[in-house]
Amino acid sequence: YYQADVWSSKPVRMESRCETCPQGAVCSSDRACGLRNASWLRCSNGSGVVGTWSLDLGTGSYVLRSCPAGHSLVRLPTDAQECKPCATDCEYILDPDTDSCQACPAGLRCFGNATVVPRVDGSTWTRNGSIYLLTSCPEGYRYLNASSADLLSPAEQECAACGKGLECTAPPCAECSPCLPGFFKHVEGPGACMACPANTYLAGSGAQSIDECVACMAHATTKSRIGQSEASACECDSEYYQADVWLAKL
């Protein structure tokens, strides 16, 4: 407890009472109230009471006015007043005096305060009220932000690398695009789709392996061209001609 004094008029007199110590002013060393010494607001071990406290002359009670970076100001109920620290490895807070601790988005590294570091270089984040909002991702990634239909919470925001057979070459991309005919991508990651090698072609889109590239018929080449999407790209060598046979469906 600490002593709360209230000055009354007509006639002037002081009324005193023992006030319950707010949670944020309880000293961890001995559980004593750090507001007992009004001149310096410190605990017996010399540590200070976290936050800026001031005396309300009308009530005689202490009121928590502001908190340092990395803390969230809890105002009510009165005996629960405190500067609540945010978790240094999984939360952040932009304004200690008005915001709550926010869960760190999947696409950021957080340190319990307003400082964050994007996990993907080239991704951009902006302040939107009390949260960080992902606004764009670099080439090779699709963005999951607070406006994405499949996003459940701001904590899930991230730049997600395109999967096999998918790419993003003109960011920002809400969705990754299938590899074009003649191209494939065999790994999940930010890389672009790769062209089928010379003397092959690939008619379909979204290919996930070089094995999907179809080799030209014997004695035919693509004349060193890569990324071909039609069988007609395979031309017979000069000493051969192309003979077409129409096969009937059984």
Image: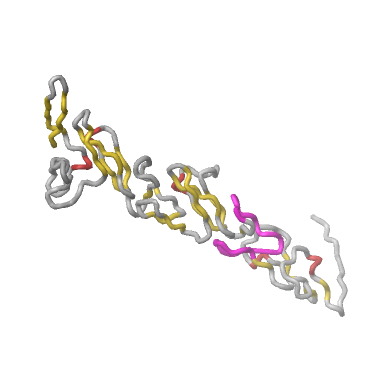
Taking 163 as reference, is 102 left or right?
left
The quarter of the image holding the C terminus is: bottom right
**In the image, residue 182 lies in the stretch drawn in magenta:** yes
Q: Is residue 143 above or below residue 202?
A: above
Q: Is residue 151 above or below residue 57?
A: below
Taking 205 as reference, is 68 left or right?
left
**In the image, residue 138 lies in the stretch drawn in magenta:** no
Which residue is painted at 15% across and 19% down in the image?
Answer: 10
Is the magenta region chiefly helix, strand or loop?
loop
Which residue is painted at 51% across and 50% down in the image?
Answer: 134
Q: Residue 139 location, x and y as percent?
A: 59, 59
Numbered label tally = 0
Q: Residue 59 location, x and y as percent?
A: 21, 29
In magenta, the rendered stretch is: 171-193
Q: Residue 62 location, x and y as percent?
A: 21, 36
Q: Nearer the viewer, residue 56 or 29?
A: 56
Taking 180 as reference, is 147 left or right?
left
Q: Quadrant of residue 226?
A: bottom right
The quarter of the image holding the N terminus is: top left
Which residue is painted at 35% across and 44% down in the image?
Answer: 96
